[in-house]
Image (spheres, rainbow, N blue to C red):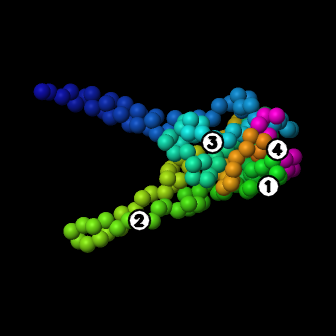
């Protein structure tokens, strides 16, 4: 059997592209396609909480963070103002119907929330060695898909997930967002409070 070596690079490129496509296919929709959104000073912010396995699948694959006590909320910010928007000091709070306020957990800390299960001793020829099991919240998607923008130019959008250690979620909850600044004037924008029920 003869192999055509000239086709190998093409096969390799196709294989790598297919692998990358399978690993990272999530993309936020335009801000106006989300039902839960608010506009102020030509800035629109949409929020969408992911609770079910089906909702979480596109962003996190087999992992549903909510099953581990971490509520992921997708945030999309569209800047239609004439000036750049500074978002490095943005602050997110999940507000329950009884007005309980829960600050967002930094994405880098999520993998430590529940901790990995205790390693089990596995007998072997050299005695017992420890075999660990990875914390499911340590999957790359959690930190890799987090909201990380520092600046949003005019006419551009930024998106990503914020995470909350919420004891429960509610359609009557809201997402409170503050700390956005006009990068030219330095003036802080009025806060946003987005009802997650759309009501």
- Residue annotated with mark 4: 193
If you read the primary sequence from the N terminus, does the residue marked by circle 1 or circle 3 appear first?
3
Q: Say whether marks 4 and 3 touch (CB < 8 Å).
A: no
At 29% from the left and 71% from the top, the residue drawn is 128
CA–CA distance in space, label 2 to label 1? 36 Å
**Which one is in front, 128 or 93?**
128
User: Which type of secondary structure does the marked residue at label 3 adopt?
Assistant: loop
Judged from the image, the secondary structure of the residue bearing numbered disc 2 is loop
**Predominant SS along the magenta part:** loop
Precedes in sequence: disc 4 or disc 1: 1
Q: Label 3, on which residue?
A: 51
Per the model, the C-alpha gap separating discs 4 and 3 is 20 Å
Q: Secondary structure at mark 4?
A: strand
Question: Which is nearer the N-term, disc 2 or disc 1?
Answer: 1
Question: In the image shown, does 197 or 11 lie closer to the viewer?
Answer: 197
Checking the image for residue 100, the label placed there is 1
Residue 149 image position (x, y, % from top left): 67, 47
Magenta range is 186-199
Nearer to me, 42 or 7: 42
Determine whether, in the image, residue 199 is placed left or right of residue 168: right
**Structural distance between the alpha carbons of marks 4 and 2:** 43 Å
Q: Is residue 189 inside the magenta stretch?
A: yes
The picture places residue 18, in percent across and down from the top left corner, at: 41, 33
Task: Reply above or below: 89 against 11.
Answer: below
Query: Could you say where residue 110 lies in the image, as x and y percent from the top left?
Result: 59, 57
Q: Is there any visible trace of residue 108 in the rendered image?
A: no
State the residue lying farthest toward the left: 1
Check if residue 187 falls in the magenta segment.
yes
Q: Residues within 10 Å of mark 3 (few under 14, many from 20)?
A: some
Residue marked by disc 2: 119
Could you tell me how far apart the alpha carbons at marks 2 and 3 are, in whole angstroms? 29 Å
């Amino acid at each position: 059997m003869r192999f055509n070596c000239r086709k190998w690079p093409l096969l390799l490129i196709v294989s790598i592209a297919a692998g990358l496509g399978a690993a990272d296919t999530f993309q936020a929709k335009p801000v106006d396609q989300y039902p839960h959104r608010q506009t102020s000073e030509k800035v629109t912010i949409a929020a969408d909480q992911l609770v079910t396995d089906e909702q979480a699948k596109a962003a996190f694959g087999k992992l549903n963070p909510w099953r581990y006590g971490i509520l992921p909320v997708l945030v999309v910010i569209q800047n239609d103002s004439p000036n750049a928007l500074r978002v490095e000091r943005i602050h997110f709070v999940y507000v329950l119907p009884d007005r309980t306020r829960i600050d967002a957990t930094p994405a880098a800390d999520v993998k430590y929330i529940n901790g990995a299960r205790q390693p089990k001793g596995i007998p072997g020829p050299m005695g017992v060695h420890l075999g660990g099991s990875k914390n499911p919240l340590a999957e790359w998607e959690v930190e890799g898909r987090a909201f990380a923008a520092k600046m949003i130019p005019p006419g551009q959008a930024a998106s990503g997930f914020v995470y909350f250690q919420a004891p429960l979620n509610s359609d009557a909850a809201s997402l409170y967002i503050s700390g956005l600044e006009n990068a030219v004037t330095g003036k802080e924008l009025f806060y946003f409070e987005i009802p997650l029920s759309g009501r």
